[in-house]
Amino acid sequence: MSGATSLAGFADPVLDSQATFRAVLEAMSRPGRVQQVPVPPELPPGIEPAAAAVLLALADADTPIRLAAGPEAEAWIRFHTGARAAAVAEAAFVLDPAARLLDLAAGTEEEPERGATLILPVAALAEGSGWRLAGPGIQSTHRLSVQGAPSGFLADWAANRARFPRGVDVILCAGDRIAALPRSVAIQEG
Amino acid sequence: MSTDAGYNFAYLDESTKRMIRRALLKAVAIPGHQVPFGSREMPLPYGWGTGGIQVTAAVLGPRDVLKVIDQGSDDTTNAVSIRAFFRRTAGIATTERTAEATIIQTRHRIPERKLTEGQILVYQVPIPEPLARLEPRIAETRRLHAMADYGLMHVKLYEDIAKHGHIATSYSYPVMVNERYLMSPSPIPAFDNPKMHMMPALQLFGAGREKRIYAVPPYTHVRSLDFEDHPFRPIRAPHACELCGSRDTYLDEVLVDDKGGRIFVCSDTDHCQERQAMKEAAE
């Protein structure tokens, strides 16, 4: 990571961070429900609006991050969050298309909260069809259609869920929309 | 936005909010697990809801409507002060009506009215560790949670039965969340425990002095521990509310003179007033 950025972050750092967090909290509490996040006015190339918002809202000097989004986006995130770069296995937030779910930190049995969060850009998110989700946060079933998830994702997810309470939580991003998959959720192909 | 100049929106600085927010997200992802957080000093003493206030401050937005209750009541010092605190530092609207609130911070009660999907319930928690009285070493309780070894608590409940003939725990009654983590529901009456099960609202717990955050996502299984031959029974005083006549709400006993006179009234003041107004309208 090198270089500087001249692009601004959130238009209103306090309230946009709050709105983004509430969207993520809502998404994490009700897996499969799609939420909208406020988009930073100027985005560098290489990063999805929702992924950028989530990192601006949640990452800082206390959270090592793994980014593979091109030098401009990396400089921009680093400038606005102060987060330092880390390897996939050490990062708290990972935004890297090459990283596999099971490569991320999963926490320990005593400290499962140390499990990382994977920010996963996908092509499109829609409620009502596709995967069947069940688990905490879902009354009976939620259906979530995810276009462009990495191949083998569902098999990896089953392995991720099997090691509960250890595990990785996922925030799916498409445009300015997000949906979350906390490690507790079970996914069945639609 | 903030009405008191010199403070950030909702009092806490942004990096503290981010730290609390990250803890909250992990708490939601691991229902019932206690996540440590860097609890800050707040402008009120420990034991007055510093954990709940920090959680509320991290969650709160300008469009939220905040309700604060203390033992079910909107008009005690603690509830009034916390509402005033957020009106001053965040400029948000507050209410005493459960139905109008988007965030409800509570000390030791769950409102009688069924909460909805648009609401978040924030509990003030004094002792987050359900095993604290049984195992004082935090390192050991952490290991017991890791192994889901909750035999200690079953022995404690069994000893209750052996001594008293029934489970003599009327508040802070331990629950299993999603059949994985033993959790303290905070000192709510056992009467309120069944309301936690499959609640449509998100439940967040903050313990300021003990520096722990935990959560129960909406629609999550919450089971009060019991035995097949001694099933869990929510207890309430066998009376009707003196003010609204309710026979299915949790009651406070109030002394009314120095000759032993006493009445029973609803602990949830908003619910009671609503029922009284309905009764008056019907008459």
Image (tube, helix red, strand yellow):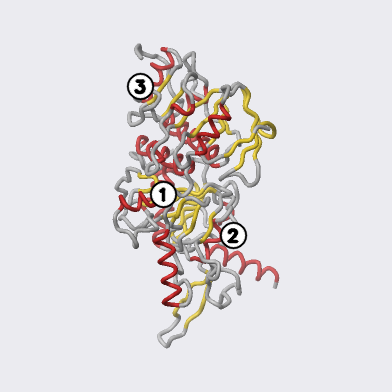
Judged from the image, the secondary structure of the residue bearing numbered disc 2 is loop
x and y percentages locating residue B249 in the rendered image: 57, 68
* Amino acid type at mark 2: Arg
Which chain letter goes with mark 1?
B
- Occupied quadrant, residue A68: top left
Give the CA distance from mark 2 to mark 3: 48 Å
Q: Which residue is mark 2?
A: B113
Q: Which mark is residue A178?
A: none
Give the CA distance from mark 3 to mark 1: 33 Å
Mark sitting earlier along the chain (2/1): 2
- Occupied quadrant, residue A31: top right
Judged from the image, the secondary structure of the residue bearing numbered disc 3 is loop
Instruction: Tell me if residue A17 can be seen.
Output: yes
Q: Which residue is mark 1?
A: B147
Whether tag 2 and tag 3 are in contact, CB under 8 A, the answer is: no
Q: Which residue is mark 3?
A: A85
- Indicate left or right for B143 with B73 as reference: left
- Seen from the viewer's position, the closer of residues B54 and B279 is B54
Judged from the image, the secondary structure of the residue bearing numbered disc 1 is loop
- Indicate left or right for B58 with A30 as reference: left
Which chain letter goes with mark 2?
B
- Occupied quadrant, residue A110: top left
Q: Nearer the viewer, mark 3 or mark 1?
A: 1
Mark 3 is surrounded, within 10 Å at the Cα level, by few (under 14), some (14 to 19) or many (20 or more) other residues, namely some
Specify the quadrant that holds the C terminus of chain B.
bottom right
